[in-house]
Each structure stands twice: as C-alpha cells, then as structure tokens.
Amino acid sequence: MTFLKTLQGAKDASSGRAEEATAFSLRDSLTAFGKCFCQGARLMVGVPDYDTYVAHIRRTHPDQEPMTYAAFFRERQDARYGGSGKGGFRCC
C-alpha cells in the first residue's frame, strides 16, 4: 500500500521538489527491497551474510577484529562442507 501511495504522491505533486522527494523515497524503498531479496536468495543457497557477521562481531565482541571477507567465506565453506578433514558433506 505504501508503494501505491508513493506513486500517487508523485502523480499528484505540483512542484518539482515534491516529485524529487517522492522519487528519492521510492528509490530508497526499491534499494532496500533489492538488498533484502538478495540476502534472502543468498541464505537459501547457503551463502552467508558477511555484513551481518561484521555487525554482530562489532556489537557483541568489540575487542575482536572481524575476519576478512575471504577468511569468513572460507571458514563458512569449511563449516558447511567439512573442509580441513573435519568431516561433513562431500560430493566427490
């Protein structure tokens, strides 16, 4: 419903500034939707979310430095697929 109100506001606005503000909020809404959609798709196929990890580490463990993206990705892959001889799923 908010999306439709935003479109109606852009159509009814008489000044360029109102249309600009509405377009900006519409762009923000679409950007947020795209980010949520991509995050959900990544989680469905098992790709972890690095930004969420960094936010968690900084919030709950301020004395620790977060891993780099490459180290984080490798650690998550090893945990999921059993790298380093730890067992786990192995396809080949």
Image (spheres, rainbow, N blue to C red):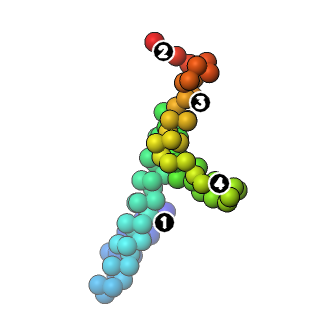
Q: Nearer the viewer, mark 4 or mark 3?
A: 4
Specify whether residue 44 is in view. no
The amino acid sitting under disc 2 is: Cys
Q: Alpha-carbon distance for marks 2 and 3?
A: 15 Å
Residue 25 x %, y %: 42, 71
Q: Residue at x 48, y 66 (%)?
A: 2
Q: Residue at x 59, y 30 (%)?
A: 79
Residue 86 x %, y %: 62, 21
Outermost right residue = 60
Q: Nearer the viewer, mark 4 or mark 1?
A: 4
| Mark seen at residue 91 | 2
Q: Earlier in the sequence, mark 1 or mark 2?
A: 1
Q: Nearer the viewer, mark 4 or mark 2?
A: 4
Mark 4 vs 1: CB contact within 8 A: no
The amino acid sitting under disc 3 is: Ala
Q: Earlier in the sequence, mark 4 or mark 1?
A: 1
Q: In this figure, which residue is indicated by the disc labeled 3?
A: 79
In depth, the one of 45 and 75 nearer the eye is 75
Other-residue count near label 2 (Cα within 10 Å), few / some / many at <14 / 14–19 / ≥20: few
Other-residue count near label 4 (Cα within 10 Å), few / some / many at <14 / 14–19 / ≥20: few
